[in-house]
Image (cartoon, grey):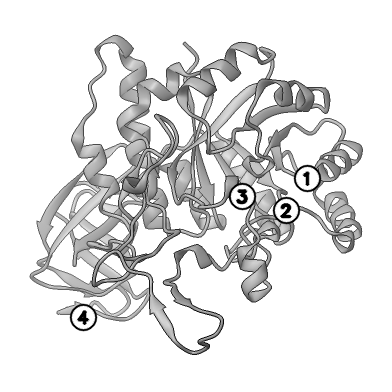
Amino acid sequence: MKKMELLAPAGDLEKLKIAVIYGADAVYFGGEFFSLRAGAGNLTIDEIKEGVAFAHEHGAKAYMTLNIFAHNEDIEPLCAYLSKIKDIPIDAFIISDPGVIMLVREMIPDAEVHLSTQANMTNYVTAKFWEAQGVKRIVIARELTFSEIRKLRSEMPESMELEAFVHGAMCISYSGRCLLSNFMIERDANRGMCAHPCRWKYTLMEEKRPGEYFPIEEDERGTYILNSRDLCMIEHIPELAESGIVSAKIEGRMKSIFYVATIVGAYRRAIDEYYKNPAGYRFDPKWLAELKKVSHREFTTGFYFDKPTNKDQNYQTSAYTRDYSFTGLVKAYDEKTGYAVVEQRNKMSIGEEIEVFGPNADFYAQILTEMYDFETGEPLESAPHPQQMLKIKLDGFAAPYFMIRKRK
C-alpha cells in the first residue's frame, strides 16, 4: 500500500521549515501574490528558493498555491511573476482558475498542476475533464463523503491523484466559494482577503423598524449561525487511507509555528503507526489530546460520514479554545549540562510547570527551576520580553526546533 502523504501549511519560511522538521512529507505555500491567504506572511522569491531547497534537502516536496480567481488586472502581473519563478524547482502548482492553469502550462511546460479545492470538483466526469487539461492531482471539494470519494477513485483515471483536507478550519460556503466578505466590506475571499464574516455575531432588523435590533438566539449567550467547528480526522486514518486519498492536507497557513508543529507531529505519528501494521492499528487518544493543546474550535468530521448537522456548528461563540501558550523555541541544547538556549515566545516564570516536545518525541513535563538571560548570564525569575534569548535547565532531552509550552 502506497503511504499517504502528509501535506502541511507553510504560511512563511519559518513555518515551512518547522512543518518539514516535524514530519510533513510535503508543504504548500503562497508567494507574495495570487494566493488565497493574502494575510499570511507568504514567501518572497528568494524565500521560495530557500524553502524549496530546504524541503528537498529533507526529502519533502514543496507545492505553490496560485489559487485566486484572477481578474483582468491580475493577468499581466501574473505572467511577469511566473517568468521570475519558472526556474525554481517547485514540485507542483495548486490552481483553481482554468485561465491560470493555461498560463502556467504555457510558461512552465513541465509544471505539475494540482486542482485547488476552490474549483469544487465533486464528480468523476469532471475529474476526467481536468485530466484532459493536464491536471495531475485534484484537491477534492470538502463536501464529499467517503462513499463519494471511493466512487470517484474507482471511476477516475489511475494516473490522477486525490488530495483531501483532513484538519483545520471549515468554510461555511461551498468549498470556499464565498461572496459574503466581498459584499459586506469589499474584501474578496476569492482573491485571498476573506474577513471571515461567517464567524461574526448577527442580529435581525425588520425593514420598517430601522435601528431596532432583535437578537438571533439559541439561548441567552446568542448564536453564530454560520460558525462551523474545525475539521479533525485524526481518529479516522484507516478510512482516509483506504478511500484512495494519496495526500492528507492540513489547513492553516495563517496559524503559528506552534500550531504547525503540534498538528503535523500528531498526524505524523498516527499515519506512521497505521502503515506499520494496518490490520492491527489502534488509535492512541494521546494524539487527539495533543491536537487540543493548540488554538482550536470544537471538532467535527465534516462531510466525510454524512452531511453536517446542527451538531457540527458552534452556536455559542466563534472564539478559539486556547488552553496552552507557546512559550519558547529551542535554538541549541547541551546534552552534557542539560541547558538549552531558548528564544522566548510568551512569558514564563520560575516555578511554573512547562512541557517540552519535539519532532518524533513525546512531550515531558517539568517545573521550571533555572532560567538565565543568555547574553548576561543574569538569573531570571520571569521572561516577559518577546523573543528574549534565554538559558534554561531542562530535565530531559531537547534539540533545535523543540518547543516549550505551558497550560494557561
Q: Callout 3, which amino acid? A: Phe
Nearer to us: label 3 or label 2: 2
Mark 4 → mark 2, Cα distance in angstroms: 51 Å
Q: Is residue 133 above or below residue 231?
A: above
* Residue 29 circle label: 3
Residue type indicated by callout 4: Glu
In percent of the image, x 59 and y 44: which residue is there? 28
Residue on which the image places disc 2: 68
User: Going from the N terminus, do you reach mark 3 or mark 4 first?
Assistant: 3
Q: Mark 3 packing: few (<14 Cα in 10 Å), some, or many (20+)?
A: many
* Label 2 SS: loop
- Give the spatial CA distance, label 3 vs label 4: 40 Å
Per the model, the C-alpha gap separating discs 4 and 1 is: 57 Å
- Neighbour tally class for label 4: few under 14, some 14-19, many 20 plus, Cα within 10 Å: few
Q: Which residue is mark 1?
A: 97
Q: Label 1, secondary structure: give it.
A: loop
The mark found on residue 378 in the picture is 4
Vertical arrangement, residue 202 with respect to residue 43, above or below: below
Locate residue 81 relative to residue 214 in the image: left or right: right
Kind of residue at badge 1 = Asp
Q: Earlier in the sequence, mark 1 or mark 3?
A: 3
Amino acid on which the number 2 mark rests in the picture: Ile
The answer to whether residue 59 is seen in the rendering is no
Label 1 Cα neighbours within 10 Å, binned few <14 / some 14-19 / many ≥20: some
Q: Say if mark 2 contacts mark 1, CB within 8 Å.
A: yes
